[in-house]
Amino acid sequence: MNVVSYHPSPEELSYTFGGRPAVGKVRPGTIMELYTEDCFGGLVRSVDDLPSRVCEFPYLNPVTGPFHVEGAEPGDTLALHFVSITPARDWAVSTTFPHFGALTGTHTTAMLQPPLEERVWRYDIDLDRGVAVYHARNSDFSVALPLDPMHGTVGVAPAANEARMTITPDAHGGNMDTPELRAGVTVYLGVNVEGGLFSIGDGHGRQGHGEVCGTAVESAMNTVVAVELVKGVATPWPRLEDDLHLMSTGSARPLEDAYRISQHDLVTWTSELTGLDTLDAYQLVSQAGQAPVGNVCDTNYTMVAKIPKEFLGRAPVYESAHERLRALGSAYTR
């Protein structure tokens, strides 16, 4: 088994997808042990560390990478299986910002009311208990929330030599912020440039659907990923697979367009897998599908379309990459 470990220094973190050379090369079938920093680069450590004071825009939402996958060419698909996602510290933070989030005026939704207060919450992370402990700022209220670690940001270099800020989700992936991207999930990303150049970051100890206030339980992570390459198979938008479901994503503004993209991709994918014509697949997804929200606060919003695999027959998905990578991950953990 080929295992590669990578713990970037602060200078090695990236803030874009595209526009940066690879930090390393890996071959398909590799297990990667990665450290990812939180969205504030570890600089927000207490309730007094307001991001506007300790962070510098645009150096927010750092990612680890990019990594060049040997043999990856435009028209191929990278399959990244998340074997484990583990908070790397015993604390995490969340915030509200002026002009950011779903329940405040923003630069694109201009309102006359005063901006939200900038406020920081610090969570205690207890891995033994499997909880993130919330503490209210203006009362003694406290509650332990179950940990559900996930990565908000994963993607590849965009096409046409573009460089996109890591906070922006689009067809290349990016800051989709879907809680569905947890351990046990395989994400499929269409390759746009030689090597794919994938990066991962923005770990969350947990997050509600939508990331309504604009931040989750932001945590540095120790993450294990198994890497595979599916040759000659294109993927138009990031897709996810777990043991029970297939999922398509869409990112855009307004939110209904993100919804349409994700549903369109799931309908056409269902048609391809089952042999159903488009309207038959549309009917099946309409009655059996789910629509979890990714984010409603980023520069683009993200929706997920999700359907149980049991309703789609036994057609292999991406040459059974999820099953192979899950087996590889299980061998690694033994």
Image (spheres, rainbow, N blue to C red):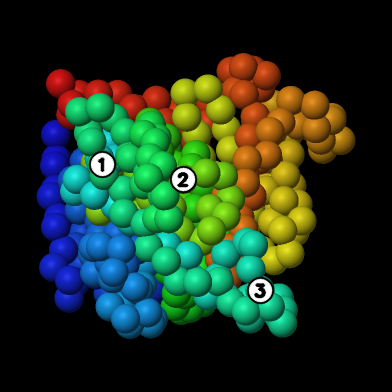
Instruction: Please report contact status of discs 3 and 1: CB closer than 8 Å, yes or no.
Output: no
For the N terminus, give its image quadrant. Answer: top left
- Is residue 274 at least partly visible in the picture? yes
Could you tell me which residue is drawn at 35 percent across and 74 percent down? 51
Q: Which residue is mark 3?
A: 105
Instruction: For marks 3 and 2, give the CA distance.
Output: 22 Å
The foreground one among 191 and 6 is 6
Q: Which residue is mark 2?
A: 207
Name the amino acid, label 2: Gln
Q: Looking at the picture, how far across and down is residue 192, in whole percent?
A: 47, 64
Q: Looking at the picture, how far across and down is residue 63, in whole percent?
A: 31, 63
Instruction: For marks 3 and 1, give the CA distance.
Output: 32 Å
- Is residue 76 at least partly visible in the picture? no
Relative height, residue 180 to residue 102 (above, below): above
- Mark linked to residue 200: none
Q: Is residue 262 left or right of residue 125?
A: right
Q: Compare marks 3 and 1 and give the one earlier in the sequence.
A: 3
Name the amino acid, label 1: Ile
Q: Which residue is mark 1?
A: 125
Could you tell me which residue is drawn at 30 percent across and 63 percent down? 47
